Image (tube, grey):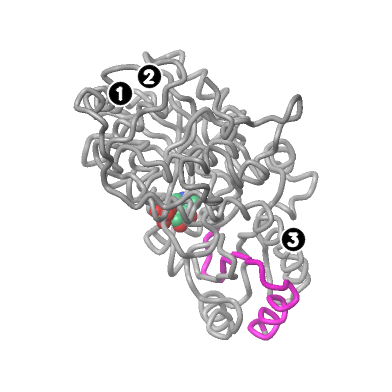
Amino acid sequence: MSHSYKKRTIGEHSLQPQSLMMGYGYDPQLSEGSIKCPNFQTSTFVFKSAEQGKHFFDVVSGRKPLNEGENAGLVYSRFNNPTIEIAENRIAIWDDAEDCLVMGSGMSAISTTLLACSKPGDIIVYSEPIYGGTDTLVNGILKQMNIQAVGFISSEGAAGLKAALAQASKLGNISVVMIETPDNPTNNLVDIAKSRELIDAIGQTQSTKPILAVDNTMLGPLWQQPLNHGADLCIYSLTKYVGGHSDLIGGSCSGSKELIAKIRKVRNGIGTTMDSNTAWLILRSLETLKIRMKASTEGAMKVVGFLNQHDEVIRIDYPGLLKEDHPQYQIYKKQCQGAGSTFSFEIKGGEAAAFKTLNKLKLVKLAVSLGGTESLAQHPAAMTHSGVPKARRELIGITDGLIRLSVGIEEPEDIIADLAQALK
Ligand SMILES: Cc1ncc(COP(=O)(O)O)c(C=O)c1O
């Protein structure tokens, strides 16, 4: 049975994600004609009968499969809730995925996924630099559970991943390869399709195939669709571009029905589900995702143009600046549709100069996080990546003069004026 509010075509014409964000998955007639999906702010749902309650429980716990065209009955908001499910349906559209799960934060999406896909004795391979929370998870918390991690430096490309896979396979079964591309804060790209090839090759030597999970927070879903390049899972900190207003914390994971069902079981069990109010804010944000990401990327390109000519700036890590002879240029061209609006730039004078510049900013706010409507700047070596040992930081390009900037949707000329006075 196909519901009219789940139609993705008009006749032969396929509707694009942007158009589907306004109504997909929501039937106004089920909510008094309300044009907007309400926030179903409820912890639990009333069953029509004990028999129905029994059936809903059997389905939601995975004991019974869904009948053809049947939706899982509503039981309890840690398992399912209409506002949450509609947000999941719409994120899945952007990711070109069969299914999606939303969770309480980007870190709950990452940790729930890694827990669902690994068991004690397994090895996780991950790209470096990676978000600090993910680093702590794989190198601290999961190690206590006898799940080991082997890193590879993103800028070393396929050779780096190949060596890490070889090393990891000597230690045990590789359960997940977790890639952040572009990496944060240095914007190196990892070739997803090439990674798939290498992972499949190593997969032949073990009993289970490693899962390729991509943290798509920096470019997605507008500028990069990892599932279309061979990834199994696409993960977001929805806190960033998808939420987009710096007013919520959330995460998601998209992929095949089969894999998502496996992760759903763990999410529902350990309780890393998103709350309905946050899901409602996500629905609001998804309607403007495309225009926000386009506007901030256009702004970032102008700001990068200004910084690129500035005497105090030594280097800028921005995919939009890659030259044709750069090894990452081809990856950028085949894998990304845009360069995004978060990048780092190194200035002369190390930490003292970087701090002075950050302290002088007037319009751009000094704060961590990224992807919001307002521009934010921070110092990775002293803030987001301060947990990475200094020698490692220098090796991966997180120098003391490096500033990370997330360009918002203010007028680019105003951001440039602010940076110009701060860099003086
Ligand atoms: C790339 C990336 N992944 C994951 C996370 C974690 O997300 P959250 O803070 O929503 O838990 C962040 C947060 O900064 C991030 O930048």
Q: Is residue 300 above or below residue 29?
A: below
The reply to whether dot 2 and dot 1 touch (C-beta < 8 Å) is yes
Q: Is residue 421 magenta?
A: yes
**Which region of the structure is painted magenta?**
397-423
Q: CA distance from mark 1 to mark 3?
A: 46 Å
Which mark is nearer the camera, 2 or 3?
Answer: 2
Which of 268 and 145 lies nearest the eye of the viewer? 268
Task: Return the disc, 2 or 1, that comes first in the chain's sequence.
Answer: 1
Q: Is residue 247 above or below residue 80?
A: below
The dot on residue 298 is 3
Graded by Cα atoms within 10 Å as few (under 14), some (14 to 19) or many (20 or more), the crowding at tag 1 reads some
Which mark is nearer the camera, 1 or 3?
Answer: 1
Task: Return the disc, 2 or 3, that comes first in the chain's sequence.
Answer: 2
Query: Can you give x and y, in whole percent of width and height, for residue 272 in the image?
Result: 31, 45
Graded by Cα atoms within 10 Å as few (under 14), some (14 to 19) or many (20 or more), the crowding at tag 2 reads some
For mark 2, give the secondary structure: loop
| Residue located 51% across and 37% down the image | 89
Q: Is residue 191 above or below residue 36?
A: above
Which residue has dot 1 on it? 59
Three-letter residue code for mark 1: Val
